[in-house]
Image (cartoon, helix red, strand yellow):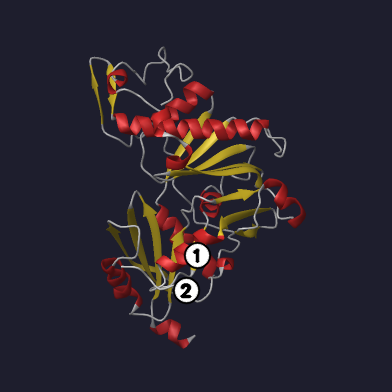
């Protein structure tokens, strides 16, 4: 206890995104955050520069904690904690899973967890947080309401959950690069110039559009149990469903948008549409009609995804920008309380 008054607490949050790694540092005393720092590295592994950056902070205190957001493709969540019912939703024989709030479970493959711990063995990982934990806590002010779908949007993946009064009804994690064949999704640049996304009289008929230094082996597997139940989060900003997150121009009444971004937003749209259809049609799930969709945008994407969903699925879409590093740090502090 005496040492805690002499040293600052160091929270290290690691988020991998778009072939890069972002490291966010918070220094805390008993009153709260003293200082923050953030750096981006052009790698998805623990490089020497990243190690030196993290160590420059952790060497100053014996009280440091390193957390990482799980980006494994083989992960998800299921609406039960019952061992007798879990296998009816997903075969977890090769996965680690944890129960949340005695209501639902989240899981990740053992091999993916092992690879994370191996990658960061030199610095050690204290917490590996599921994106579904981030999603649930980020929308804690909404998730207790009527049925709605909530989505954590990352650069190359979507973590989707349908909640009703805090009860998970359905969840799915989708990796964009794995779930969509690029050959099946083609939008010609010349076609984009003819699309007016702001024109209420013009909608895109999606049915007619053509389908777009190595580390030593760990002695033992780490404790996935460090990903624990999380109950609270600080107040967050209001929804921002109007700000554009990409550069665009308007020429002669035609809305011009970067074709690559539209292409990726259309991929996301197809995955969300597929997930909602699965929720409606799969008898395993307690399906109800979804009117509202809340997106935690951690990739700073364009507004085209919102337009696709609203115009083609007639669903209300609300978007919040989210800093994933800050959210990982937030749930780490909650874990340490």
Query: In the rendered image, which quarter contains the C terminus?
Result: bottom right
How many marks on residues? 2
Q: Residue at x 44, y 61 (%)?
A: 68
The answer to which image quadrant residue 212 occupies is top left
Outermost residue on the right side: it is 84
Instruction: Name the residue beneath numbered marker 2.
Output: 218
Outermost residue on the left side: it is 251
Along the viewing direction, whichever of 335 and 116 lies nearer the viewer: 116
Point out residue 150 in the picture as x, y percentages from the top left corner.
54, 41
Mark 2 or 1, nearer chain start: 1
Q: Which mark is residue 327?
A: none
Q: Are marks 2 and 1 in contact (CB under 8 Å)?
A: yes
Q: Residue at x 39, y 51 (%)?
A: 323
Q: CA distance from mark 2 to mark 1?
A: 8 Å
Along the viewing direction, whichever of 68 and 289 lies nearer the viewer: 68
Along the viewing direction, whichever of 212 and 49 lies nearer the viewer: 212
Residue 238 seen: no
Secondary structure at badge 1 equals: helix
The answer to which image quadrant residue 9 occupies is bottom left
Q: Residues within 10 Å of mark 2 (few under 14, many from 20)?
A: few
Q: Residues within 10 Å of mark 1 (few under 14, many from 20)?
A: some
Instruction: Name the residue beneath numbered marker 1.
Output: 114
Residue 148 seen: yes
The answer to whether residue 143 is above or below residue 55 is: above
Q: Is residue 158 left or right of residue 303?
A: right
The answer to whether residue 27 is above or below residue 282 is: below
Q: Is residue 93 left or right of residue 10?
A: right
The answer to whether residue 209 is above or below residue 50 is: above
Secondary structure at badge 2 equals: loop
Outermost residue on the top side: it is 201
Point out residue 4 in the picture as x, y percentages from the top left corner.
44, 82
């Amino acid at each position: 206890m005496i040492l805690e008054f002499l040293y600052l607490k160091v929270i290290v949050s690691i988020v991998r995104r778009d072939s890069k790694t972002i490291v966010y540092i918070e220094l805390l005393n008993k009153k709260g955050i003293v200082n923050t720092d953030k750096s981006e590295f052009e790698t998805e592994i623990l490089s020497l520069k990243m190690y030196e950056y993290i160590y420059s902070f952790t060497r100053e205190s014996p009280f440091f904690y390193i957390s990482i957001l799980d980006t494994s493709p083989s992960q998800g969540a299921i609406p039960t904690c019952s061992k007798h019912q879990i296998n009816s939703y997903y075969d977890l024989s090769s996965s680690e899973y944890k129960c949340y709030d005695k209501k639902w479970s989240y899981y990740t493959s053992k091999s993916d967890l092992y690879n994370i711990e191996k990658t960061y063995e030199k610095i050690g990982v204290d917490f590996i947080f599921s994106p579904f934990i981030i999603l649930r806590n980020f929308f804690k002010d909404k998730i207790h309401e009527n049925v709605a779908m909530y989505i954590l949007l990352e650069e190359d993946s979507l973590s989707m959950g349908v909640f009703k009064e805090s009860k998970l009804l359905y969840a799915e994690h989708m990796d964009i690069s794995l779930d969509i064949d690029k050959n099946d999704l083609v939008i010609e640049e010349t076609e984009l110039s003819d699309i007016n996304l702001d024109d209420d009289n013009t909608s895109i008929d999606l049915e007619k559009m053509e389908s777009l230094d190595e580390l030593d082996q760990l002695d033992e597997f780490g404790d996935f149990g460090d990903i624990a139940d999380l109950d609270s989060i600080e107040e967050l900003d209001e929804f921002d469903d109007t700000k554009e997150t990409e550069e665009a121009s308007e020429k002669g009444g035609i809305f011009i948008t970067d074709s690559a971004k539209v292409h990726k937003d259309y991929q996301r749209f197809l995955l969300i549409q597929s997930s909602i259809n699965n929720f409606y049609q799969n008898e395993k799930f307690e399906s109800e009609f979804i009117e509202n969709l809340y997106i935690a945008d951690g990739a700073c994407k364009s507004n085209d995804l919102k337009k696709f969903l609203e115009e083609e699925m007639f669903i209300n879409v609300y978007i919040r920008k989210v800093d994933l590093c800050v959210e990982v740090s937030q749930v780490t502090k909650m874990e340490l309380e």
